DNA sequence: AGCGGGATTTTCT
DNA sequence: GAAAATCCCGCTT
């Protein structure tokens, strides 16, 4: 079923997305993955795209919880976020890494890589799942790209640290990942 | 295993 | 005009 916690804060959404699944169908091929690493961003945070207000690029982050915010960066990569919080408040959780559950061969083909390199990073997993700008604003309740509630992950198995690749608000503890999971981007 | 640089283009100042 | 929520490759140790 679709998660029921997405209208909460980005911090809580990022924490609770760990263990949830993403189901993707491409040309009758099915892929299932488990979310193992996330980061949270909201409009009070200097590192967030929404910190300086709404623009064409970030408008989806101000939309309904459960939409997908996809942005393009470094001239060649896409990254995706699950929109959190109340409508009108710019917040979301970046999906940084996923663990393949099924359809591994399909993702290996799109990535031209095998093993952990298939999905141990935010732009890598977007390539593995064929997520591009066409999915910006997509509602994750619907095929062909759906978010599904997963098994509960105990607090003892979750690590909370600083985020990766940002220059502002470096000390904020807004990154979460599943302890000892091989697909986490950095340890 | 770790470091450094290049790729490539949208977005915002 | 500079920076960017990144990735990959090649070089060094």
Image (cartoon, coloured by chain):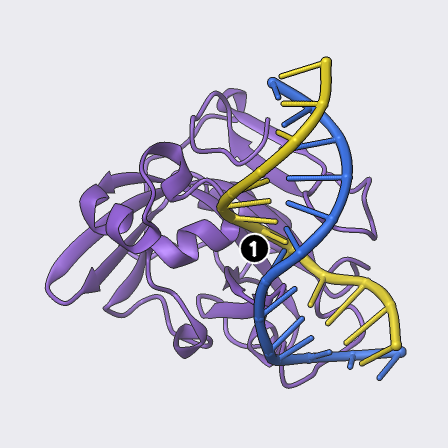
Chain colours: A purple, B blue, C yellow
For mark 1, give the secondary structure.
Answer: strand
Number of disc labels: 1
Point out the image quarter for the N terminus of chain A. bottom left
Tell which residue pokes out farthest to the left in this image.
A28
Is there any visible trace of residue A42 in the rendered image? yes
- Badge 1: chain ID: A
Point out the image quarter for the C terminus of chain A. top right
Q: Nearer the viewer, residue A37 or C5?
A: C5
What percent of the width, then of the height, locates residue A20?
37, 44
Identity of the residue drawn at 42% across and 58% down? A126
Image position of A68 (left or right of A76): left
Is C8 rendered above or below residue A29? above
The quadrant holding residue A144 is bottom left
Image position of B4 (left or right of A131): right
Image position of A186 (left or right of A45): left
Q: Which residue is mark 1?
A: A93
What percent of the width, then of the height, locates residue A42?
70, 61
What percent of the width, then of the height, locates residue A131?
38, 65
Tell which residue pokes out farthest to the bottom in this image.
A56
Image position of B13 (left or right of A100): right
Identity of the residue drawn at 44% across and 26% down? A181
The quadrant holding residue A89 is bottom right
Q: Residues within 10 Å of mark 1 (few under 14, many from 20)?
A: many
Identity of the residue drawn at 10% across and 64% down? A28
Is there any visible trace of residue A4 in the rendered image? no
What percent of the width, then of the height, locates residue A23?
26, 55
Q: Nearer the viewer, residue A22 or A184?
A: A184
Identity of the residue drawn at 23% across and 69% down? A143
Is C13 rendered above or below residue A100? above
């Amino acid at each position: 079923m679709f998660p029921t916690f997405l209208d909460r804060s980005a911090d809580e959404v990022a924490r609770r997305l760990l263990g949830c699944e993403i189901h993707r169908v491409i040309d009758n091929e099915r892929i299932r993955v488990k979310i193992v690493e996330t980061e949270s961003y909201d409009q009070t945070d200097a590192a967030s795209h929404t910190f300086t207000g709404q623009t064409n690029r970030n408008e989806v982050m101000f939309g309904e919880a459960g939409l997908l915010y996809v942005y393009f960066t470094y001239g060649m990569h896409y990254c995706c976020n699950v929109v959190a919080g109340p409508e009108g408040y710019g917040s979301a959780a970046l999906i940084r890494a996923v663990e393949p559950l099924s359809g591994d061969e399909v993702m290996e083909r799109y990535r031209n890589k095998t093993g952990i390199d298939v999905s141990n990073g935010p732009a890598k997993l977007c390539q593995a799942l064929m997520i591009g700008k066409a999915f910006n604003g997509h509602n994750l309740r619907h095929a062909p790209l759906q978010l599904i509630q997963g098994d509960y992950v105990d607090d003892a198995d979750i690590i909370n640290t600083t985020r990766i690749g940002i220059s502002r608000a470096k000390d904020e503890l807004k990154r979460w990942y599943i302890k000892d999971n091989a697909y986490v981007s950095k340890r």
